[in-house]
Structure formats: C-alpha cells, structure tokens
Image (cartoon, grey):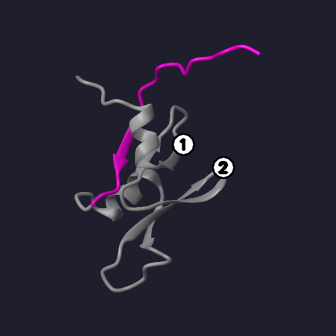
Amino acid sequence: MARYRKKPVEIEAIQLTDHTTPDQVADWCGGRAVPHPEKTYTGGPIVIEIDTLEGTMRAEPGDWIIKGIAGEFYPCKPDIFDATYEEVED
C-alpha cells in the first residue's frame, strides 16, 4: 500500500444561505430549486436538487455546491468543505 496526497486544484463553489437566491444557484449548477421535502410549510427552506452520476443529490440550507474540475456539480456539507478547501486570494 502507498500513501497519496490530493493534488491542489481550484474549484468554484457557492454556499446555499439566506444571502443567496435559490433560483440563481439552481441556474448556475443546472439544478432545481424545490421546497424542502420534510419541511414543506409556507416560507420553509428551499433545497437544490442536482442530477449527478450517482443520482439526484440534494443541497440543503448551509451546504456548499461545488463545480468540480470536469464541470460536474455536487453538494458538500459545510464541515467537509471547511476541512478540504480554503479560499483563493487574487
């Protein structure tokens, strides 16, 4: 067995928060802004459904949506994002 390190790559990402517009985020990643399936009350949270090679995945409020190096999109939980990525300074 050998050890490997992840190559440094730059990605594009946006966090689904109260400061983002779900429809614009969905347009960016080719997803769909839909009401949260477990919290369907009026004014409830919106999730973004993203079709991936692994099937439809859901980005919940607080999650990041990442555009990968091959142009694919997928959601990422905030703790994993923080442990994996750091912001690139111009």
Residue 65 position, x and y percent, is 43, 49
Task: Tell me if residue 30 is in the magenta stretch.
Answer: no
Quadrant placement of the N terminus: top right
Q: Which residue type does callout 2 highlight?
A: Leu
Q: Quadrant of residue 85?
A: top left
- Residue 45, placed above or below residue 59: below
Which residues lie in the magenta part? Answer: 1-17
**SS class of the residue under badge 2?**
loop
Q: Is residue 19 left or right of residue 72?
A: left
Residue identifier under label 2: 53
* Secondary structure that dominates the magenta span: loop
Is the residue under label 2 in contact with that under label 1 (CB below 8 Å)?
yes
Residue 10 position, x and y percent, is 41, 27
Residue identifier under label 1: 72
Residue that extends furthest to the bottom in the rendered view of this protein? 42
Q: Which residue type does callout 1 highlight?
A: Glu
Q: Nearer the viewer, residue 84 or 13?
A: 84
Task: Tell me if residue 12 is in the magenta stretch.
Answer: yes
